[in-house]
Image (cartoon, rainbow, N blue to C red):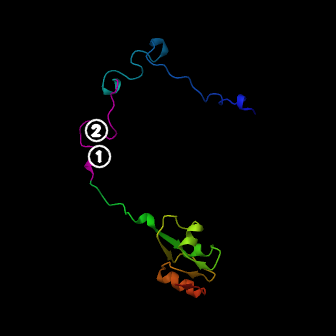
Amino acid sequence: MQLNSIKPAPGAKHPKRRVGRGIGSGLGKTAGRGHKGQKSRAGGFHKVGFEGGQMPLQRRLPKRGFVSPTKKNDAEVRLSALDRIPGDIIDILILKQAGLVSGSALNVKVILSGKIERAVKLQGIPVTKGAKAAIEAAGGSVE
């Protein structure tokens, strides 16, 4: 295959539709816009959500809830995920390098989900009561 021999697949390219060019074209006179009305005129479109002057739906419904500004900074790590990390000492930096938490995470917490088979030492990471018991039962420790 040469660069000068590349062409689109058959049927992939269509000629531009020329509207308003006589009745024989099938798109003459009104050019596919129908008769009269706002949508038939040049520039005759309204903004998204406009309902003809009626109060739009997004303004009729009440505001609800909020977006937490700190949610993107918090992360949870399952106990079973700690099993897959090489090394015995685990801190936030190691969790980020392993891809278990996002790079923007500031607060990480280990939760009891799954099992841990080996002894690990957690440094500077809070854990739930159940997760702490499971880590210590496997011979690990939490600092």
Residue positioned most to the right: 1
Judging by the rendered image, the residue that carries numbered circle 2 is 51
**Would you identify the image quadrant in which residue 43 lies?**
top left
| Residues at discs 1 and 2 in contact (Cβ within 8 Å) | yes
Vertical order, 40 against 122 (above or below): above
Considering the numbered disc 2 on the image, is that residue within a helix, a strand or a loop? loop
Q: Quadrant of the N terminus?
A: top right
Dominant secondary structure of the residues highlighted in magenta in the image: loop
Vertical order, 97 against 31 (above or below): below
Q: Residues within 10 Å of mark 1 (few under 14, many from 20)?
A: few
- Residue at 47%, 83% in the rendered image: 129
Given residues 62 and 120, the one toward you in this image is 120
Camera sees residue 115: no
Judging by the rendered image, the residue that carries numbered circle 1 is 57
Image coordinates of residue 125 in percent, x first then y, are 50, 78
**Would you identify the image quadrant in which residue 11 lies?**
top right
Considering the numbered disc 1 on the image, is that residue within a helix, a strand or a loop? helix
Residue 50 shown in magenta: yes
Camera sees residue 48: yes
Residue positioned most to the front: 93
Q: Is residue 117 left or right of residue 2?
A: left
Image coordinates of residue 72 in percent, x first then y, are 44, 63
Q: Residues within 10 Å of mark 2 (few under 14, many from 20)?
A: few
Image coordinates of residue 110 in percent, x first then y, are 51, 76
Given residues 102 and 50, the one toward you in this image is 102
Residue type at mark 1 is Leu
Stretch in magenta:
42-61
- Residue at 60%, 87% in the rendered image: 139
Residue type at mark 2 is Glu
Residue 40 shown in magenta: no
